[in-house]
């Protein structure tokens, strides 16, 4: 869901510039786009779903999925060709979809992870992954990395300290909660509640949810829990001191997050970008076995921007104390500059190609 959410500011900006924007995604993501960007054209164009295992580490589980992934890349590449012809598409922007490039249009590949982190025993294989990823990136007109260059970055070694192709551009953080031209609210109204943001696929989403319900349902202050299911009709359910929302529009969700005493969430990169854009601290709990989230949790906690706890450590309870707030105004300011610069370069290249 995070990969879909970070496409919203790009689509929103292009629509404001009077471009005809078509959204292509799986059905579960289309409802998110329809809620946040009503009035656009929509195509059911699902991407590859790697799935998650309850027991196996994610990198092992993915090894068994490689043949299916390669098949899907070929199929979606062929389908894109038909979509371009049927809808007169001339720019394609896709998030981590290996097959959505075409020589006849300007194409953009979005990723925060040119380097896929592996566990220590397999770390020697990371350069091979970087090399393979470079070959994919080179197929596209541009690669947009939603982060900042230099030390003031969120992704660490996932996109820094490695050789990147010449078509890579850092575009700043992408958040559906902050318009590229909008000023950050320095003094949001504080409410008396904690907020839990659930994300990621099953079964780990439900495992974390149940653990947190046990720990929070009888605690003060009350907790608001976002289940991250925009495909469902907006539902509100109570369980003890917890209020569950299946989904809320970004504007309302932003108000709840900004007004929270304490935030608990996964360490998914898109969630991290959204929290940073709102200048919010959080306790981040990486999905077990997902090396990307485990690395981000460690990296960002070492920087002092977030605190982290493993899912296993939740048995001992949650230290419900507000964390130190780090002012990320510089990140938001630089992001606006990088975003506009990259988008202008993309559109200039597109017009020259025409």
Image (tube, rainbow, N blue to C red):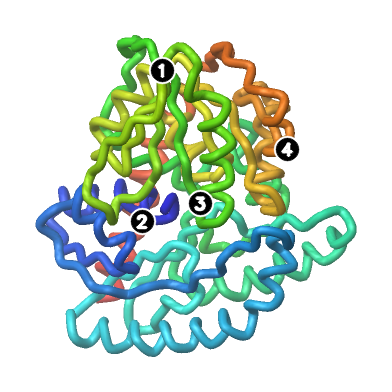
Q: Could you tell me how far apart the alpha carbons at marks 4 and 1 are, in whole angstroms?
A: 23 Å
Q: Which residue is mark 1?
A: 222
Measure the alpha-carbon separation of dots 2 and 4.
46 Å
The x, y position of residue 231, in whole percent, is 28, 56
Nearer to me, 218 or 284: 218
Question: Which is more N-terminal, label 1 or label 4?
Answer: 1
Where residue 345 is drawn, which disc sits there?
2
Q: Quadrant of residue 317?
A: top right
Residue at 42 percent across and 76 percent down: it is 100
Which mark, by number, is residue 312?
A: 4
Kindly identify which numbered label has been placed on residue 315. none
Marks 4 & 1, CB-CB < 8 Å contact:
no
Q: Which residue is mark 3?
A: 200
Q: CA distance from mark 3 to mark 1?
A: 24 Å
Q: In this view of the protein, which residue sits in the foreground, 141 or 62?
A: 62
For discs 3 and 4, the disc positioned in front in the rendered view: 4
Element carrying mark 1 = loop
Image quadrant occupied by the C terminus: bottom left
Name the residue rendered at 60%, 55% in the picture.
113
Q: Nearer the viewer, mark 2 or mark 4?
A: 4
Q: Nearer the viewer, residue 168 or 230?
A: 230
Q: Quadrant of residue 351?
A: bottom left
């Amino acid at each position: 869901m995070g990969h879909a959410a970070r496409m919203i500011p790009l689509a929103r900006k292009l629509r404001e510039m009077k471009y005809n924007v078509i959204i292509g995604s799986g059905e579960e993501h289309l409802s998110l786009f329809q809620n946040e960007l009503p009035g656009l054209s929509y195509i059911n164009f699902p991407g590859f779903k790697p799935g998650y295992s309850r027991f196996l580490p994610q990198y092992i589980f993915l090894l068994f999925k490689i043949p299916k992934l390669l098949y899907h890349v070929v199929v979606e590449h062929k389908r894109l060709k038909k979509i371009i012809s049927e809808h007169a598409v001339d720019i394609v922007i896709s998030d981590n979809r290996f097959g959505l490039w075409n020589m006849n249009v300007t194409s953009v590949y979005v990723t925060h992870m040119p380097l896929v982190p592996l566990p220590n025993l397999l770390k020697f294989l990371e350069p091979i992954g970087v090399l393979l990823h470079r070959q994919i990136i080179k197929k596209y007109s541009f690669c947009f990395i939603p982060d900042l260059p230099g030390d003031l970055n969120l992704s660490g070694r996932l996109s820094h300290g490695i050789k990147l192709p010449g078509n890579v551009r850092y575009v700043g953080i992408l958040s559906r909660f902050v318009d590229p031209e909008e000023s950050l609210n320095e003094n949001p109204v504080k409410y008396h509640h904690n907020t839990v943001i659930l994300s990621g696929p099953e079964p780990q989403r439900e495992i974390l949810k149940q653990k947190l319900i046990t720990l929070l349902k009888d605690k003060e202050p009350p907790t608001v829990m976002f289940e991250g299911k925009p495909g469902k009709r907006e539902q509100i359910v109570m369980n003890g001191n917890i209020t569950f929302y299946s989904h809320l529009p970004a504007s309302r969700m932003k108000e709840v997050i900004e007004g929270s005493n304490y935030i608990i969430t996964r360490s998914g990169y898109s969630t991290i970008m959204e929290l940073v854009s709102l200048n919010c601290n959080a306790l981040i709990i990486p999905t077990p076995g997902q090396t990307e989230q485990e690395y981000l949790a460690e990296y960002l906690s070492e920087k002092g921007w977030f605190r982290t706890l493993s899912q296993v450590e939740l048995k001992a309870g949650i230290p419900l104390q507000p964390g130190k707030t780090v002012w990320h105004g510089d990140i938001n300011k630089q992001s606006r500059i990088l975003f506009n610069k990259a988008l202008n370069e993309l559109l200039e290249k597109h017009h020259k190609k025409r």
